[in-house]
Image (cartoon, coloured by chain):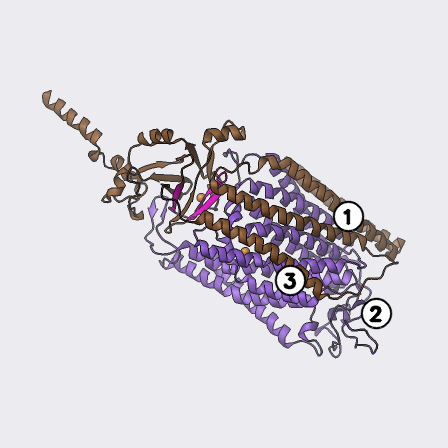
Chain colours: A brown, B purple
Amino acid sequence: MQTFFIVAILGLGFLITFQIAKASEYVAVLRGEEKARKQTNKVNAFMLLAFLIIGMIGVYYCNEKLKGKILGEPASDHGILVDRMLYITIALTGIVFVITQICLFWFAYKYQESDKRKAYYYPHNNKLELIWTVIPAITLTVLVGFGIFYWYKITGKAPENAMIVEVTGKQFGWEFRYPGKDGVLGKKYFKNVSPEKNNPAGQLWEDKYNHDDVFMEQEMHLVVNKPVKLVINAKDVIHDVGLAHFRMKMDAVPGTPTTMWFTPTFTTKQMIEKTGKPDFVYEISCDQMCGKGHYSMRGVIVVETQEEFDAWLAAKKPQYLVANPDKDPAAVKTDTLNKVAAVIN
Amino acid sequence: MDLWIVSMALFVVSSLLGGLNYISTILNLRTKGMSMTRLPLTIWAMFFTAVLGVLSFPVLLSGLILLLFDRNLGTSFYLSDIVVNGEILPNEGGSAILFQHLFWFLGHPEVYIILLPAMGMVSEILSVNSRKPIFGYMAMLGSLFAITILAFLVWAHHMFVTGLNPFLGSIFVLLTLLIAVPSAIKVFNWLTTLWRGNIRFTPATLFAIGFVSLFISGGLTGIFLGNSTIDIHLHDTMFVVAHFHIVMGVASFFGMFAGVYHWFPKMFGRYLNSTLGYIHFWVTMIGSYLIFWPMHYQGLAGIPRRYLDKRGWVSFNDFPELDKMITIVSIIVFAMQLMFVFNFIYSIFKGRKVTSTNPWGANTLEWTTPIRPGHGNWPGEIPEVHRWPYDYSKDGREFIPQTEPIGENESKH
Ligand SMILES: [Cu+2]
Ligand SMILES: [Cu+2]
């Protein structure tokens, strides 16, 4: 019913507009085409000026209305750099935007056709061309300079004390692996991937480093003010680890691991206070179109203190023991006890 | 999917042949007196567009052929370490990033393949309708050339976050932001062309002015995205959607609309209904800014592209009314385009008839042909060209067609 209504209204609007347009053409012929043309010329010139003024007010209004909903304080050290670069660029391009748009619409209005004026024959002026080649070139040099400086800081080597977490994207969710006490992620091979055998990451159990690696899905924990280096993988197609609050992003590519590092500067709890949203969580969004469920490829990051983190991780069982229960000292112990009990009985 | 690849291959071949045709026609079939520096800027833009296409499309074609191999012949150019839905694929050693390189090596020039003809037509239309020569013809040409060269050297700015070597990234930042220089030159020259003109607002002029406005807006946000530091945050967000729709989508369409309104009388001997043209312009202009301007804010808030439902998110759920507004406006703007199509078809048969060969008072050659040109365009000899196409308001004369010989006392420029 609603669709029918919309279509009907559109159709009606269509018809009316067309009839007006046709009629206006006849009227123009009746009134004398030249006179009618001059009339519309004036109207359009005025509308261009009005568009400029209302448009600029609109830009201001839009900014007032939406600025509270964007950005907020960045929650990582790199985020501060990204935001600084962003504000430098907004300032410089903003000036250019206002000046050029005003010139464009003001000239259009001011120099609208008039019988009193003759256009000024002005084909070139090399000095002017030089000026507006050099000024943009200098401005852009500044932007490139700052940009590359921050870029190297952000993409540079991760600090030695950074903790490592492996992030793997798959249709449509996230998997995480922590290296455990040894601080090294064990080797894996994609042909070993087997959720049935409790080996969803494809870890090679022969590799000693794998024995303490902890595997989990959907939720990742980080330590506040401690640098973290993410090793990023994808299982099936290209995904992207998007961390809006940390201002970080890196593609997850099957077959080619990528990395990024940053230091979270606020715990989740602090962010709840800062944003005033009681349900605030850091979210991992997939930013690279990856299929039907792309929009729902959500992960959660909890940033907490070192003690909270240690307690959380200690409660997790290494995947090696999940996949090989016979190697689990705890399980083996209960097993022997059971056997002993059986013998006694 | 395979059929799509084959159809893309056919498309590439046809655009190659078309491009070669443009290049050889422009180089070899100019009329007597039409030196390269007397060509209208529209033709120059077409020429550079064709060069871009001819040099970049083959790379896409090769990329597509490799894709066809991967899909059907068991090769692993792009595939490695893949487990889809629990099924382990045998491929190893390929790189998905390779496809991105091959794709964007065409993909970026393609932006300019779309944009350059619009720039050329806008230059022509602004000059004709402000009754002034285009300002800085040689600078316009030089900047077209610079854009063409740079267009080949910036493709990896789409790949800053693919894990690309940061040093390589910084080179692409430099080359990408360099494009802003010729683009700025073009904008300032268009502005100066309007300055002290005597402007007639035909629908074509309005669309040309709209093009310049949108090109400024969309071009400036390119400076954000071309800077890898900012791109880390804005990559694949709504900001990108806003940027490229404004600059490559709407702006190019505006250039094309300007061209259609301007040359329609030449094509069909009738005018498009200009009242509809004005309505078309204003609805589209206002609508485009309403749709795309607020999207920048969504992008700054980190909202990813191509999310059909954001209700499951805590971070991205702040703009429901805005999304509604954008949807409504885009339906209206789209309906307006249908109106344009209708106007186009209706006017071919029922439009107001053109009564003179040169209704806009333009200098270029096409307006010296009969109202309805026959085969070969001119009934007799093809005309000779004696001057550049932008002698408007020179020596007190409103316009001097290219076919008119230089007068004895004519001032030089
Ligand atoms: Cu994904
Ligand atoms: Cu590009």
Viewer-closest of A178 and B392: A178
Quote the CA–CA distance across marks 2 and 1: 31 Å
Q: Is residue B62 above or below residue A182?
A: below
Q: Which residue is mark 3?
A: B117
Number of residues whose C-alpha sits closer than 10 Å to that of mark 1, classed few (under 14), some (14–19) or many (20 or more): some
The residue range painted magenta reads A228-252
Q: In this rendering, is residue A52 above or below A226?
A: below
Name the residue type under label 3.
Pro
Residue B110 appears in the figure: yes
Residue B37: x, y in percent?
68, 72
Q: Is residue A255 left or right of residue A79?
A: left
| Residue that appears at 51% across and 28% down | A273
Image quarter of residue B130 = bottom right
Q: Do the residues at pointers 3 and 2 share their chain?
A: yes
- Image position, residue B220 (x, y; %): 62, 51
Residue picked out by circle 2:
B395
**Residue under numbered circle 1:** A49
Q: Residues within 10 Å of mark 3 (few under 14, many from 20)?
A: many
Q: Secondary structure at mark 2?
A: loop
Q: Is label 2 in contact with label 1 (beta carbons under 8 Å)?
A: no
Which mark is first along the chain, 2 or 3? 3
In terms of image quarters, where does ligand 1 lie? top left
